Image (cartoon, rainbow, N blue to C red):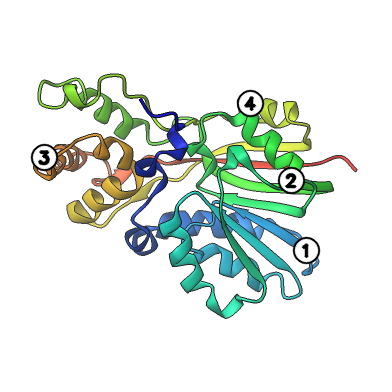
């Protein structure tokens, strides 16, 4: 057996970054709302925790004309795409492959921004303690991730499908790769980690995709990529996704995802 944690396994770590860059419009729209909450001087050093392909990092850099951003991501593919996308800002951005549970920073950043990333980390106590340690006294965290009943309808369908004779052998011992805290749980976690002025909330973000092909590709590459990777052959992966796509056609509206977003704010004491 491997000694690597889930987050360190190559199959878990890597994403198809070109597909994500093309399909991540919902995540980008949510992230822009997070950036709109920032009150910046313009010269801060900010950590973009889970920078992905750099689409939001570029907007953050635009809001920091005299500042710098360090973008971290677990996926080397994502970082390669981000490096290309962020080339106009090369003198003000650094990109680093990094696990949130093993951050190398101590009292380094004025602020931390993150969108659509923290729910992929199962140990939130350790995550937020590490983020607190990375901030200077008075530093702030402004973030959003999946929370509460996030994509509950799809998760139930995937769980039910994983018990059928066709797929059950591929999901023995499988556990969901997410931690979707609700607002109260997240507030307690942030407070245990040492944050003050904590504010958390969960809001619906129903997302309708453009028909069956878009739904199939989006769910396969973004939402259920760990489940799909558990299935060994392309034929069976396609069959798995076909079933889920056909079931989604009956939803109201069809081919939609019942996303819920967990908003997070906290500050490190002076």
Please tell me which residue lies in front, 100 or 42: 100
N-terminal of the two: label 1 or label 2?
Answer: 1
C-beta proximity under 8 Å, tags 1 and 2: no
Say whether disc 3 or disc 4 marks the residue closer to the N-terminus.
4
Viewer-side label of 3, 2 = 2
Residue at 43% x, 33% y: name it.
Answer: 6
Q: Which residue is mark 1?
A: 44
CB-based contact (under 8 Å), mark 1 and mark 4: no
Q: Circle 3: is it few (<14), some (14-19), or many (20+) Cα within 10 Å?
A: few
Q: In the structure shown, which secondary structural element does the residue marked by tag 2 occupy?
A: helix
Choose the circle earlier in sequence order: 3 or 2: 2
Tell me which corner region of the image, top left, top right, bottom left or bottom right, holds residue 67. Answer: bottom right
Q: CA distance from mark 1 to mark 2?
A: 14 Å
Q: To which residue does mark 4 refer?
A: 184
- Mark nearest the camera among 4 and 2 is 2
Tag 4 secondary structure: helix
Q: CA distance from mark 3 to mark 4?
A: 39 Å
Give residue 15's position: percent from left, percent from top. Answer: 37, 52
Residue 78 drawn above or below residue 64 = above
Cα distance between the residues tagged 3 and 2: 44 Å
Task: State the residue in front, 105 or 82.
Answer: 105
Give the mark nearest the N terminus, 1 or 4. Answer: 1
Q: Position of residue 11 (x, y in %)?
A: 34, 43
Q: Position of residue 241 (x, y in %)?
A: 18, 41
Mark number, residue 239: 3
Residue farthest right in this picture: 270
Name the residue that disc number 2 marks: 134
Q: Give the Cα separation between the discs numbered 1 and 3.
A: 49 Å
Q: Indicate the quadrant containing the N terminus: top left, top right, bottom left or bottom right.
A: top left
């Amino acid at each position: 057996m491997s000694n690597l944690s889930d987050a360190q396994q190559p199959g878990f770590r890597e994403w198809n970054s070109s597909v994500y860059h093309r399909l991540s419009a919902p995540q980008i729209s949510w992230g822009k709302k997070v950036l709109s909450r920032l009150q910046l001087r313009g010269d801060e050093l900010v950590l973009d925790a889970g920078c992905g392909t750099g689409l939001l990092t570029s907007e953050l850099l635009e809001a920091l004309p005299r500042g710098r951003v360090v973008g971290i991501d677990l996926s080397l593919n994502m970082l390669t795409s981000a490096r290309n996308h962020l080339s106009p800002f090369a003198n003000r951005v650094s990109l680093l492959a990094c696990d949130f549970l093993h951050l190398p920073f101590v009292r380094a950043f004025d602020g931390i921004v993150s969108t659509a990333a923290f729910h992929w980390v199962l140990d939130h106590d350790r995550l937020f303690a590490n983020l607190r340690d990375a901030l200077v006294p008075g530093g702030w965290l402004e973030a959003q991730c999946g929370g509460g009943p996030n994509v509950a309808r799809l998760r139930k369908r995937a769980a039910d499908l994983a018990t059928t004779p066709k797929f059950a052998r591929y999901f023995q011992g499988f556990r969901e790769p997410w931690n979707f805290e609700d607002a109260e749980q997240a507030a307690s976690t942030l407070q245990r980690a040492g944050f003050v002025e904590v504010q958390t909330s969960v809001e619906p973000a129903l997302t309708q995709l453009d028909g069956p092909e878009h739904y199939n590709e989006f769910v396969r590459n973004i939402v259920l990529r760990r489940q799909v990777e558990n299935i060994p052959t392309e034929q069976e992966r396609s069959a798995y996704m076909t079933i889920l796509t056909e079931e989604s056609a009956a939803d109201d509206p069809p081919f939609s995802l019942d996303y819920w977003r967990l908003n997070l704010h906290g500050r490190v004491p002076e």
